[in-house]
Amino acid sequence: MRSAALQAALLLAAFPPAGDEHGDRGPAPAAALGGLSGFTATSRVTLHAAPDDPHTLEVVMGFPDRARWTLRREETSDNRIEYRFGEHVFARQQDARESEPLPREDLGAYYRRQALRQAAFVWPEGAAWEGTGERREARIVALAGDPPEAAIGRLAAVLGADGRPRSIASHDASGRLEETLEIRGWKESGGRAWPAQLDLSAGGEPVWEETVSAVEAATRSDDFFVPANQRHVLRPYAAVERMRLERAVALRLPLAAGADWRAAREQADAARREREPELLRAGQALDPRTWIVLAEDTLAPVAVELRLLKPPRAPPQGFEERPPRDALRLVLGGLAPPAAADRDRLRAARPPGRRAEAWLATVGAGDIQLDCVLAP
């Protein structure tokens, strides 16, 4: 039976956002905070409303604005995962096949929750603290690089005699209290002090007690912070790779005029089923990937290619040589066909005086690759 506490524990209350409107500008470049590129913390959680129903919380943060939270009900498959990649936030329940964007009205509280956790686990560098004595305050902005006047709330910390916070609370832009972390203990690990025991409350009401079992510095790639069905959000930030394509031996199959992406893949699959048995008998194997040849102006599929896994010296009947070539490549998030914006990024990266010989999309190996093959 699913724990009803899972969603309530991560989306603690319907705090309406204030000043949280942002365009789709993407995450800030990865940058260290307090000498850390990120961290992973694992905790055992005891819910106030269900003390006999223990959970495990894993928080992975990549600075400045990437995060992945997983709350699991112990000894079950029941869980909830929340992902953050810049302003993109997604959530998935165990019984859901795919992640969905977090509702816009929940984003303000979500961003403040990330700021609260970061401030507690990366003290004091995790926020821009101001004040003296036992009290400190820091503004919360939704996205790295937002100016202070765009703050969507604030953090308030109360320090102990050792100079570390005894509690940190988050408030929305109107000043209303949202969440509070009472830090009841610290431990040293990896040259830093990390919270060891925490109590979480929302609006002054207790939510859970948390015992941190492991915490360590960690570095993760961007795709870790984006669910598989939402990888398209990675596309604008993919780096253009410059590479040398090795010699290949390919079977080229022209497509009928007007063929779409689905038709291209179906024709490639049919040709693979037809040719593979004969090739295997001859000691050859087809590469499991498919290359879709694209028209440069429209990106419409015009042909498909199947390639041998190990190119022989002499191509089999019907196959053609593909000599080594320089190329520019984008590894595109997700499985959707390349878009004009992807092509234009490769066009802009083309060295002066070099023209495109072919445009190829490679499918069947996870994320789609788009290659601009350069003429010699």
Image (cartoon, rainbow, N blue to C red):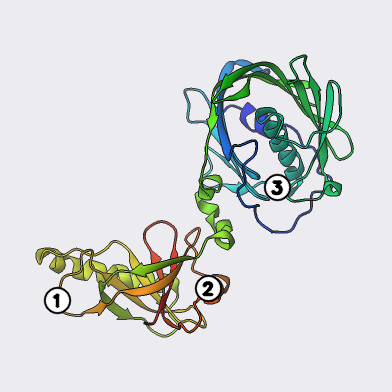
Badge 2 marks a residue whose secondary structure is helix
Note whether residue 261 is visible: yes
* Residue labelled with disc 1: 314
Badge 1 marks a residue whose secondary structure is loop
Vertical comparison of 294 with 207: above or below = below
| Mark 2 or mark 3, earlier in chain | 3
The mark lying in front, picked from 1 and 3, is 1
Marker disc for residue 35: none
Is 209 positioned to the left or the right of 145 in the image? Answer: left
What residue appears at the point 11 percent right and 63 percent down from the top-left corner?
283
Q: Quadrant of the C terminus?
A: bottom left
What residue appears at the point 36 percent right and 69 percent down from the top-left corner?
244
Q: Are marks 1 and 3 in contact (CB under 8 Å)?
A: no
What residue appears at the point 37 percent right and 58 percent down from the top-left corner?
365
**Viewer-proximal residue among 249 and 241:** 241
Amino acid on which disc 3 is placed: Pro
Amino acid on which disc 2 is placed: Ala
- Graded by Cα atoms within 10 Å as few (under 14), some (14 to 19) or many (20 or more), the crowding at tag 1 reads few
Query: What is the x, y in percent for residue 187?
Result: 60, 17
| Mark 1 or mark 2, earlier in chain | 1
* Residue labelled with disc 2: 349
| Mark 1 or mark 3, earlier in chain | 3
Marker disc for residue 103: 3
**Viewer-proximal residue among 143 and 36:** 36
Single out the residue that lies furthest toward the left: 282
What residue appears at the point 49 percent right and 68 percent down from the top-left corner?
337
**Viewer-proximal residue among 180 and 183:** 183
Is 260 positioned to the left or the right of 112 in the image? Answer: left
Q: CA distance from mark 2 to mark 3?
A: 37 Å
